[in-house]
Image (cartoon, rainbow, N blue to C red):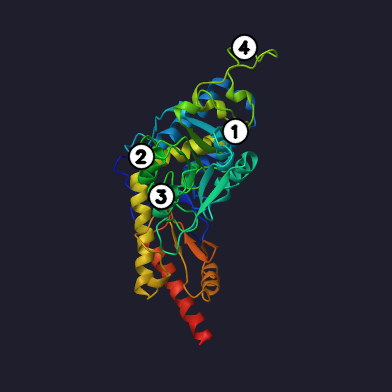
Amino acid sequence: MHDADDCPPADHALADRFIMTAGTLYLDTAAQGPRLRTVQAAAQAALEASIAPWRLSMPAWEASIESVRTRAAALFDGDGDGDGDGDGDGDGDAVALVPSAAYGLAIAARNLPLAAGEAVLVLDGQFPSNLLAWQQRCSEVAARLVAVRRDHGADWTDAVLAALDADPAIRVLALPQAYWHDGALLDLDRIAVRARAAGAALVLDLSQSLGALPADIARWQPDFAVAVGHKWLLGAPGLAYLWVAPRWRERGVSIEQHWLARDGGDGWHFPADRPAPYRAGARRYDAGGVADPMRLAMADAALAQVHAWGVARIAAAVCTRTTALQSALLEHGLGDWLPPGPPAHFVGVREPGGGMLATAVAAMAAAGVVVTARHGLLRFAPHLHVGTDDLQRVATIIAAAARSADRHRG
């Protein structure tokens, strides 16, 4: 539990909350979040307890499942307010526990109606978890996939809305809030209104934003929304959260039939002549194997800290760090490396000529800076374990590498 005034700062004041390797500057939260000490301690305690699994009662295990479920639900509802209690008391009926974003999106693809000749809209280059399921679904029913493209520097939101206007056959919009390559944001407020007007379902992959940006499911009204727990939610791999709209909580079909999703009664009885009823709400989609006590303990500790800090505060603090990087690159004369628009919680830096990027990657690796380099971009995704001075140092490394590469080219 933390004080309500525990507002994430821009310096290294919170570095000791995380476990970091000496000599390494980890800037890759968009791949996997840095490890909180409380999360590590929870994992170690659960591992020790697993020596005697008979000591974990069914009621205690179920309580840990519901704690994680309600904390995650509160974040979808935009209730990560940092009020200091760290409880995150959301609507547990709204969220299913699944192993991955891909699993949750496969549930969406299985349940949403889609007919021959209709279309599903995605972003060009969208993360495969929110692409492959729709490719399969379209193939099964002879529907089409519409991949929205944008020119460099253009706005994703405008491109999505233009594609929606141009194609009345679009029945599903499967989108992120933040584009995984470079952090470019989509205006889901505008998109959601237009999707409803067109009679199209909205499916959201919030894996690159939940926990780092406020969410507002009530305003967006998606049919399904999913987020993994190991990125901006700072938990363990193998546990993700699927938010389900009320109409799909009572009639949707899961992609597996697991006892955890069914109500076996006090006697835990599953008759052969009829299936046991589903448990309430989105629990019907709960997957097998994900409610491992150690994974739950890690998730609970991570979500508690996210709630205690508050998502809006985390967003502001992380943006301070990406702003520091962009400002420092500008000072070094590398403004043409930067994406247009204000910085988000992570940012993709692109060397316009393409010849200096490998040199910059090698220089950062030599300095112990961990980033993702893909699709001609350097993706910087810091969290609260780093300070603004770290990002300024990274800009200096990039600038020096660029000058070195330029001299060798000359």
The answer for how far apart the CA atoms under marks 3 and 1 are is 41 Å
Mark 2 near mark 3, Cβ–Cβ under 8 Å? no
Query: Nearer the observer, disc 3 or disc 4?
Result: 3
Estimate the spatial distance between the alpha carbons at disc 3 and disc 4, rounded to whole Å. 53 Å
Looking at the image, tell me whether mark 3 or mark 4 is earlier in sequence order.
Answer: 3
| Pick the front one: 292 or 78 | 78
Question: Which quadrant of the figure has residue 328?
Answer: bottom left
Q: Position of residue 316 (x, y in %)?
A: 33, 51
Q: Earlier in the sequence, mark 4 or mark 2?
A: 2
Nearest to N terminus: mark 2 or mark 3 = 2
Residue where numbered disc 3 is placed: 161
**Which SS class for mark 2?**
loop
Res. 318 visible in picture = yes
Q: Residue at x 39, y 70 (%)?
A: 329
Label 4 close to label 1 by CB (< 8 Å): no
Circle 1 or circle 2, nearest the eye:
1
Dots 3 and 1: beta carbons under 8 Å? no
Secondary structure found at label 3: helix
Q: In the rendered image, which quarter contains the N terminus?
A: top left
Q: Nearer the viewer, mark 3 or mark 1?
A: 3
Query: Which of the two residues, 192 or 261, is positioned nearer the viewer here?
Result: 192
Q: Which residue is mark 2?
A: 2
> Which residue carries the number 1 mark?
292
Going from N to C along the chain, the mark reached first, 4 or 1, is 4
**Residue at x 52%, y 73% (from the top left corner):** 354
Q: Is residue 20 above or below residue 221?
A: below
Q: Is residue 56 visible?
A: no
